[in-house]
Image (spheres, rainbow, N blue to C red):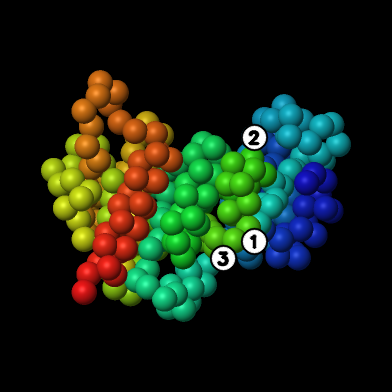
C-alpha cells in the first residue's frame, strides 16, 4: 500500500501492518500525521532510500509505503486464552530471528498439524507473515493464531509466569531433546538461519537441548529442527496418554 492518504487510513483503521517505510530524504514534517498514527499503534517507520520504495510500489508512492499483513495478528493474551481452552497441555512455538518466508511458513504448517495452540514472532528480529509465508504454510496460517510481539524475551517471561516452560533448540547443548520432558506445558524456541537462538534467550530457557547430529553438516535447517522438536513433543504426549 502506497500514498500518504492510503497509508494514514490504514494506520487509523487498525489494519495489520508488517512494515512501514518512508523516504529517507523527504523532510520528516511531511509525515507528521503518519508518525502520530504509527506511534499510537506502536509501529516504527523505517527510513529507506527512494529506490527501495519504488521497487515496492512503483513511482507513485509519495514517500511512504506500508506492507500490510495477509492475516490479523493476535496478542499474547489471545494465545493464553487459546491455551486455557485446549484439551491438553500448552504447546507453542516461538521463532527467534527466523527470517526466511519458506521456513516460517513450513514451521506454521507443522505447528498447526502437530496441534500447537499458536506461534510467537519477534517484531524486529523475525520475519513477518507475508503472502509468501501464507503460501508456504499451505493455509495453516489462516487457522493457527500468530502473535507478533515487540519483545520476545518479555513474552517468554510472561509464558513462564503462566507455568509454560521454554525449551530452546541449540546445536551444541549438552542435553538431547529426548531427555527433556515435553509432556508439560511447553513453548519451543527455534533460532534463525545462521545465528540460532540468542545467548540471552538460552540463559532464560528452562531447558536447552540439541538434536542428534551424525553427519558432516553443522546444523539442521530451522524449519526441520522445529518440526523434529514439535513431533518429539507429540510423541511424548501420545506415549504418556497411552500408559495405563
Taking the image as drawn, is residue 15 in sight? yes
Quick check: 67 left or right of 4?
left
Q: Residues within 10 Å of mark 1 (few under 14, many from 20)?
A: some
Q: Is residue 77 above or below residue 202?
A: below
> Would you say 23 lies left or right of 175 here?
right
How many neighbours does mark 2 have within 10 angstroms: few (below 14), some (14-19), or many (20 or more)? some
Residue 204 image point, x, y percent: 25, 57
List the residue tagged with mark 3.
Answer: 74
User: In this view of the protein, which residue sits in the foreground, 15 or 189?
Assistant: 189
Q: Residue at x 64, y 61 (%)?
A: 72
User: What residue lies at 34% left-to-right and 45% top-to-bottom?
Assistant: 228
Image x and y of residue 63, in percent: 77, 40
When asked about the image quadrant of residue 218, the answer is: top left
Q: How many marks?
A: 3
Residue nearest the observer in this picture, 124 or 39: 124
- Which sits earlier in the primary sequence, circle 1 or circle 2? 2
State the image coordinates of residue 217 (x, y, percent, origin top left). 29, 23
Q: Nearer the viewer, residue 191 or 242?
A: 242
Secondary structure under badge 3? loop
Q: Earlier in the sequence, mark 3 or mark 2?
A: 2
Q: CA distance from mark 3 to mark 2?
A: 28 Å
Question: Which residue is at 59% across, 41% downward?
Answer: 136
Helix, strand or loop status at disc 2: strand
The residue labelled by disc 2 is 48
Q: Decide: marks 1, 3 in contact (CB < 8 A)?
A: yes
Q: CA distance from mark 1 to mark 2?
A: 26 Å
Asked which secondary structure carries label 1, the reply is loop
Amino acid at each position: 500500500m502506497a500514498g500518504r492518504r492510503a497509508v494514514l487510513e490504514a494506520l487509523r483503521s487498525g489494519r495489520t501492518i508488517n512494515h512501514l517505510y518512508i523516504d529517507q530524504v523527504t523532510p520528516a514534517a511531511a509525515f507528521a500525521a503518519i508518525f502520530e498514527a504509527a506511534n499510537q499503534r506502536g509501529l516504527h517507520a523505517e527510513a529507506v532510500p527512494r529506490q527501495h520504495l519504488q521497487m515496492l510500489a512503483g513511482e507513485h508512492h509519495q514517500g511512504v509505503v506500508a506492507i500490510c499483513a495477509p492475516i490479523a495478528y493476535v496478542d499474547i493474551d489471545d494465545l493464553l486464552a487459546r491455551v486455557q481452552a485446549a484439551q491438553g497441555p500448552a504447546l507453542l512455538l516461538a521463532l527467534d530471528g527466523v527470517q526466511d518466508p519458506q521456513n516460517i511458513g513450513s514451521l506454521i504448517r507443522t505447528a498447526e498439524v502437530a496441534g500447537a495452540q499458536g506461534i510467537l514472532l519477534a517484531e524486529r528480529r523475525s520475519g513477518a507473515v507475508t503472502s509468501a509465508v501464507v503460501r508456504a504454510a499451505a493455509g495453516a496460517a489462516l487457522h493457527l493464531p500468530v502473535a507478533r510481539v515487540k519483545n520476545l524475551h518479555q513474552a517468554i517471561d510472561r509464558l513462564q509466569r503462566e507455568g509454560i516452560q521454554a525449551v530452546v533448540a541449540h546445536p551444541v547443548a549438552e542435553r538431547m531433546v529426548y531427555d527433556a520432558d515435553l509432556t508439560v506445558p511447553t513453548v519451543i524456541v527455534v533460532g534463525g538461519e545462521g545465528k540460532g537462538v540468542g545467548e540471552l534467550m538460552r540463559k532464560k530457557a528452562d531447558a536447552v537441548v540439541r538434536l542428534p547430529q551424525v553427519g558432516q553438516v553443522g546444523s539442521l535447517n530451522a524449519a526441520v529442527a522445529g518440526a523434529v522438536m514439535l513431533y518429539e513433543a507429540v510423541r511424548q504426549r501420545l506415549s504418556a496418554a497411552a500408559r495405563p
